[in-house]
Image: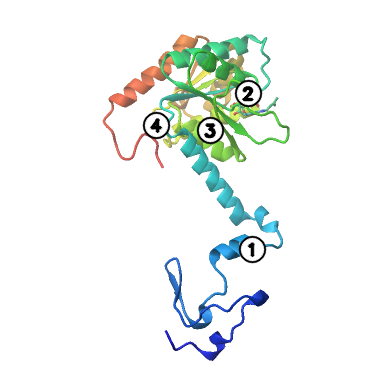
């Protein structure tokens, strides 16, 4: 190329570098640049040399990249997990609480039935389920969350992924599990239960059993759902069928296994079991 303009030819690069040959076509990926458009540094140079204010790391476009990376890391870590069940429950359940022992039996029982156990990776009921799964020789997964108070993944997590964003983490609980089993818990647990129920009710996810363990604990909530929500017409009677309550680990597991069996007996449709 010999028709470079005078302007381009005299366009001095910064910092006393050698001028680039602006008489040549310059390729940057699929983009071609000529004359005054020929840059004075490569993309790599710009990346490695750049300094300056760092406030962009707190801006939404960068945040979107971080969110995207959580999905990429989560999908990558869990894609080959195989059949799994997500277990929820209070972070505050103490190891001497009977619910802790129930969580351990549940974790071990799920492993015995061929499932990996996924929890929030924290203490309490989450730890109990991970402990049961780990000690039964199964796959014990913890999806941790960044919180203002550091608790870290419990020691029984064998495969852990830490998330910054609750919503990215919650996608993993549903996407990689065949069902939810829920031990007594507070706001975090209730949030997870009601998200799952909403996904099933709105058919965003199909054939997804939700089992609440601990009938005495959940009874008040069920009474309220029947006496207030159903009575006021804000939910329908069939919506209540989306939840099963039991105190029996074997029954909880049987519900998951049966739902799984029924699903695999169905002919495959579309892109899978989960609606987009
Ligand atoms: C001692 C303490 C509060 C530790 C918090 N550490 C946590 N680590 C991981 N997941 C958590 C934690 N707290 C709440 N969650 C999430 O919320 C649920 C428990 O919340 P909650 O304790 O029921 O309301 C868990 O299933 C978990 O997914």
Q: Secondary structure at mark 2?
A: loop
Who comes first in sequence, dot 1 or dot 4?
Answer: 1
| C-alpha span from label 1 to label 4 | 50 Å
Residue bearing mark 2: 154
Figure quarter occupied by ligand 1: top right
Snapshot quadrant of residue 228: top right
Residue bearing mark 1: 49
Residue bearing mark 3: 195
State the image coordinates of residue 179 (x, y, percent, origin top left): 45, 25
At x 48%, y 32%, the residue is 174
- Given the current orientation, which residue lies at the most extreme right position? 149
| C-alpha span from label 2 to label 4 | 31 Å
Residue bearing mark 4: 206
Instruction: Determine whether the beta carbon of the residue marked 2 sits less than 8 angstroms from the nearest atom of ligand 1.
Output: no
Who comes first in sequence, dot 1 or dot 3?
Answer: 1
**Direction from residue 271 to residue 209 in the image, left or right:** right
């Amino acid at each position: 190329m010999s028709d470079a303009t005078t302007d381009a030819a005299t366009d001095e690069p910064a910092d006393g570098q050698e001028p680039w040959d602006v008489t040549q076509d310059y390729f940057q990926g699929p983009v071609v640049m000529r004359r005054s458009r020929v840059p004075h540094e490569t993309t790599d140079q710009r990346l490695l040399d750049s300094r300056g204010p760092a406030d962009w790391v707190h801006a939404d476009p960068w945040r979107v990249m971080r969110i995207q990376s959580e999905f990429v890391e989560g999908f990558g870590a869990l894609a080959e997990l195989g059949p799994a069940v997500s277990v929820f429950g209070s972070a505050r359940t103490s190891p001497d609480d009977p619910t802790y022992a129930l969580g351990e039996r549940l974790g071990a029982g799920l492993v015995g039935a061929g499932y990996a156990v996924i929890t929030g990776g924290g203490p309490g009921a989450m730890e109990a389920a991970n402990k049961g799964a780990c000690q039964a020789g199964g796959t014990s997964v913890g999806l941790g969350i960044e919180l203002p108070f550091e608790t870290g993944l419990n020691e029984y997590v064998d495969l852990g992924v830490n998330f910054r964003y609750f919503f990215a983490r919650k996608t993993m609980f549903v996407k990689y599990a065949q069902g939810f089993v829920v031990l007594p818990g507070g706001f975090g647990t209730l949030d997870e239960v009601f998200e799952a129920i909403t996904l099933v009710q709105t058919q965003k996810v199909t054939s997804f059993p939700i089992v609440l363990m601990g009938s005495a604990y959940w009874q008040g909530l069920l009474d309220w759902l029947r006496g207030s929500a159903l009575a006021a017409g804000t939910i329908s009677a069939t919506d209540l069928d989306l939840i099963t309550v039991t105190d029996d680990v074997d029954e909880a597991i049987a519900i998951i296994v049966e739902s799984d069996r029924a699903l695999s007996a169905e002919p495959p449709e579309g892109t899978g079991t989960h609606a987009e």
